[in-house]
Each structure stands twice: as structure tokens, then as C-alpha cells.
Amino acid sequence: MILGIQILGILFAIFMLYITFLHKKKKELTSKEYLFWAVAWIVFLLLTLFPTSLDFLIIGVLDLSRRLDFFIIIGFMFLIGMIFHIYLTTKKTQNKVEKIVRQLAIENAKTK
């Protein structure tokens, strides 16, 4: 029997797959990025449809009492990883902008 929260999860996964596809079509995502996100949304969809499929890992191996605990831990780990990736990307962009500004300042000083 499918619960209301599962229906919401299924709709969310399908919506995010569609949004991911649109960004790929607009060439805003590379093939690797598209593949990563498409697989992530498909895994999310499958876990929503079959929430007991990971019980052997959650209860048996990790000894967690509830599935929700596992998903919260995985969610936090994913978010922390994404934040770190965004930080590194921002830092690289900042360094590139500083380099370009220095070069333009030097060129402007030479022409004056």
C-alpha cells in the first residue's frame, strides 16, 4: 500500500527528473552532471517506492532502529558534501576574478 508521503516523494522525484532534463536540454548541465542527478533522482524514486529495500543495511549492519534516522544521516552527509563543493567552486571563481582584475588594472596603468 502506498502512503501519502510516498505519493509526494514520487511526484517530487519525477518533477526533479524533468527539471534536470530541461537543464540538460538547455546545455546548462554537462553529461556527467546530468547522469549524476538523473541517477540520484531515480534512486530517490526507487527508495520512495520500496522503503524496506535497505532494511538489511539500516537495521542489520548499521543497527539503526528507524529508517528515517538513516535517511536523515545520509541527507546531512550529502548536504555537507554539496556545501563543500560549492565553497570550492566559489573560491576558484573568486581567484579567477581577482586575477582578471589585477591584469586589467596593470593594463590600464600601462596605457595611462
Image (spheres, helix red, strand yellow):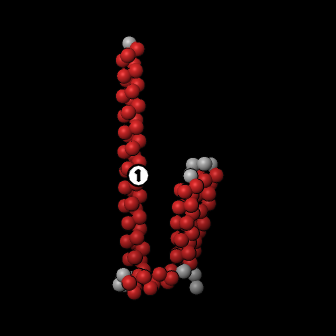
| Left or right, 17 with reference to 65 | right
Residue depicted at 38% across the width and 33% down the height: 99
Secondary structure type for disc 1: helix
Regarding residue 110, the answer to whether it shows in the image is yes
Regarding residue 8, the answer to whether it shows in the image is no
Q: Quadrant of the C terminus?
A: top left
| Residue 94 screen position, x and y as percent | 38, 40
Residue count near mark 1 (Cα–Cα under 10 Å), binned few <14, some 14–19, many ≥20: few
Q: Which residue, given by chain and number where applicable, does mark 1 sit on?
A: 86
**Nearer to the camera, 83 or 39:** 39
| Residue 53 screen position, x and y as percent | 51, 82
Picture quadrant of residue 72: bottom left
Q: Quadrant of the N terminus?
A: bottom right
**Total numbered labels placed on residues in the image:** 1
Residue depicted at 40% across the width and 35% down the height: 97
**Nearer to the camera, 88 or 51:** 88
| Residue 8 screen position, x and y as percent | 55, 71
Residue depicted at 38% across the width and 66% down the height: 77
